[in-house]
Image: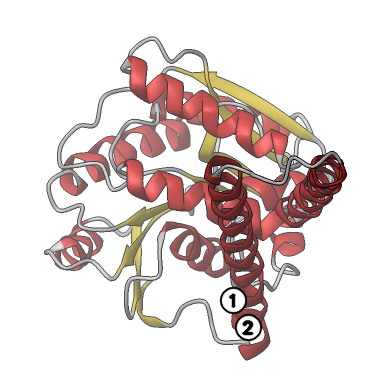
């Protein structure tokens, strides 16, 4: 008996692209079923992440017309990572393997069968990895590569050029459920699971319709969320900076004493101003970083649900 595959697609204001996405995914899934590659019970699950447009109405209509398509409606917008978690946790009850992907058709769906083949070869987690960034603008390529380098610098283990296009088997999904933190960063958490992994390379396409949900501002916030969720290295860096400034202050003290005993007590305002601004800036930076971690601890201790499912279509 073939394994049941479920596709999980988080959606936020995707009314412009959703009908075409569903059409292409259904066609691909039906082809894989006809080739006896996956079970006929396989599903496509759209997760509505509190969309403000007609995304949920479209999902309901697609479900009525095509039983293969199912849906999850979250009560409010909780963000891509939490919406994805909601979908993964819901479908793992009946699926043997789950592939997560975006709704904008930038992830190449023609390689879905390669993901499944890697799973059949014994891989519990299969990463979709971009084979090139030549189509990206220079700025986009620079910021994307900078993101992975920065995450590596702060001790976060990520798969280079991998986003959230991946396959997970039931074992890895059950292991993922053991991670209870509110601040979810799946790209960093999943490599921690420790199962056998594989990869599938693909060419990322242009967005079919609509606008990107990740402008630069959100990408920066996403990177900071990942760093502070996975690493305490920023706090260690503050300790190092504090030690450096302490050594500098000792040197300045020695310099002042030498000038005092040599009778040269007139000092300029430049060194004083620089010292005040440097130390003040470091203090504000330290307070901000420590405050970010304290805020995350505060949210974790409240133990609030990451999402609330309002309605399901199965």
Distance, label 1 to label 2, CA atoms, is: 5 Å
The vertical placement of 289 against 271, above or below, is below
Question: Which residue is found at the position 80% from the left and 44% from the top?
Answer: 244
| Residue lying at 87% horizontally and 45% vertically, measured from the top left | 261
Q: Secondary structure at mark 2?
A: helix
Outermost residue, bottom side: 302
Q: Is residue 132 above or below residue 55?
A: above
- Look at 63% across and 51% down and name the residue there: 227
Callout 1: SS: helix
Q: Is residue 158 placed above or below 172 in the rendered structure?
A: above
Left or right: 299 in relation to 143? right
Q: Position of residue 79 (x, y in %)?
A: 40, 63
Pinpoint residue 48: horizontal percent, then vertical percent.
31, 65
Residue where numbered disc 2 is placed? 298
Circles 1 and 2: CB atoms closer than 8 Å: yes
Left or right: where 234 falls relative to 214: right
Q: In the rendered image, is residue 42 in sight?
A: no
- Examine the image and state in which quarter residue 149 appears: top right
Mark 1: give few (<14), some (14-19) or many (20+) Cα within 10 Å.
few
């Amino acid at each position: 008996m073939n394994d049941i595959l479920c596709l999980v697609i988080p959606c936020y204001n995707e009314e412009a692209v959703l009908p075409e996405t569903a059409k292409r995914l259904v066609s691909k899934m039906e082809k894989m079923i006809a080739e006896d590659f996956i079970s006929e019970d396989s599903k496509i699950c759209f997760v509505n992440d509190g969309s403000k447009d007609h995304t949920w109405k479209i999902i309901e209509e697609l479900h009525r017309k095509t039983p293969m398509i199912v849906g999850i409606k979250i009560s409010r917008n909780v963000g891509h990572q939490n919406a994805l978690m909601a979908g993964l946790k819901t479908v793992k009850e009946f699926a043997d393997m789950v592939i997560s992907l975006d709704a904008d058709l930038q992830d190449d769906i023609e390689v879905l069968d390669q993901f499944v083949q890697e799973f059949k070869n014994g891989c519990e987690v299969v990463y979709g990895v971009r084979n090139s960034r030549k189509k990206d603008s220079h700025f986009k390529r620079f910021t994307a590569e900078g993101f992975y380098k920065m995450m590596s610098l702060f001790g976060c283990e990520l798969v280079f050029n991998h986003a959230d296009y991946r396959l997970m088997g039931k074992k890895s999904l059950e292991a993922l459920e053991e991670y209870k933190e509110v601040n979810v960063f799946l790209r960093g958490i999943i490599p921690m699971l420790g199962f056998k992994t594989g990869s599938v390379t693909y060419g990322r396409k242009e967005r079919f319709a609509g606008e990107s949900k990740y402008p630069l501002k959100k990408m920066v916030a996403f990177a900071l969320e990942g760093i502070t969720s996975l690493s305490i290295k920023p706090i260690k860096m503050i300790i190092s900076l504090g030690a450096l400034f302490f050594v500098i202050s000792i040197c300045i003290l020695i310099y002042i004493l030498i000038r005092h005993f040599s009778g040269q007590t007139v000092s300029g305002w430049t060194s004083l101003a620089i010292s005040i601004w440097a130390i003040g800036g470091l203090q504000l930076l330290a307070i901000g970083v420590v405050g970010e971690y304290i805020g995350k601890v505060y949210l974790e201790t409240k133990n609030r649900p990451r999402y609330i499912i309002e309605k399901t279509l199965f």
